[in-house]
Image (spheres, rainbow, N blue to C red):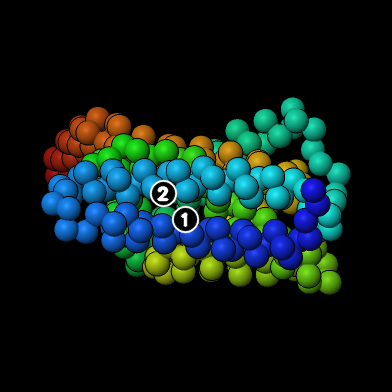
Amino acid sequence: MQFKRLTVNLATLILFAVVQTIAIVPTKLYEGAGLSQLKMLEITISWMAVTSIITILILWYMHKHIKNPTSLEQGKKEPWLNVIIWSIAGIFLAIFGQAIASLINIHILNQPVESGNTQRLMGLARQSHLLIIYIVLAGPILEELIFRKLIFGEIFNLIKAPKWISFIVAVLVSSFTFSLAHSDPQHTLIYVVMGSIFSGLYVLTKRIIVPMIAHMGMNGIVVLSQIVFKGSIEKELEKQSQVTHLIYNSIVHILN
């Protein structure tokens, strides 16, 4: 079965909206049931997880059977060995880009150190580890389909200009939309950098699975650092801070 690209795009938008709002259903169904906050959270996340899996399967099938793909999708795709290489490289590029953008955001733009959206998700994930599946796996797949393949891809395909101009415009629009969707305008620069990296991987390889894997890897590292190894990392940073402070005091003492 073949689908028109417009049909697939509309289905992507609608199903993405369903995944984002499905939490309303269990909240209403179990309202007044006397369930604990943790139990209610687990039920809600279970609904999100199941809905996400069904949505991904439907959209993956539809996107594989588009009868009129964009010019980007019609381009020569990178062989699978290169896909693996670029997917792994993309994870490190994303982490590095995020680190640089964060430093600029904090020290030059004077924005908050931590993203409110990220901290909220990490707080929920500490209560129910089921949410980690969505953050690391389902979330990146759906977000790359909607923000990279649909929004970026359609704008990149629509603008009849030099490729670099089309790329910049498409990245800015998709990244700003991504930032608004996360209700995190203070960290827009980080989203623009991430969008540039993931979009670049998509344009380079012509395979949406590459930015998906890079996005999943980046989110996985964030989850590990925020939840699994947070205590160890904080202790190590504290030790390093003490050592740095000791060295600084010793230098000051010598100079005096």
Instruction: Reply above or below: 80 against 24.
Output: above
Give the numbered dot on residue 48: 2
Closest to the observer, 99 or 203: 203
Q: Callout 1 environment at 10 Å: few (<14), some (14 to 19), or many (20+)?
A: many
Above-or-below relation of 176 to 16: below
Q: Residue at x 47, y 48 (%)?
A: 51
Q: Nearer the viewer, residue 226 or 72?
A: 72
Q: Amino acid at mark 1?
A: Val
Residue 164 shows up from this direction: no
Q: Position of residue 30 (x, y in %)?
A: 24, 54
Marks 2 and 1, the one that precedes in the sequence: 1
Quarter of the image for residue 248 reads: top left
Left or right of 94 in this view: 67: right
How far across and how far down the image is residue 150, in percent? 67, 60
- Taking depth in this image into account, of 29 and 181 the one nearest to the observer is 29
> Dot 1 corresponds to which residue?
19
Q: Residue at x 83, y 71 (%)?
A: 161
How crowded is the residue under tag 2: few (<14 C-alpha within 10 Å), some, or many (20+)?
many
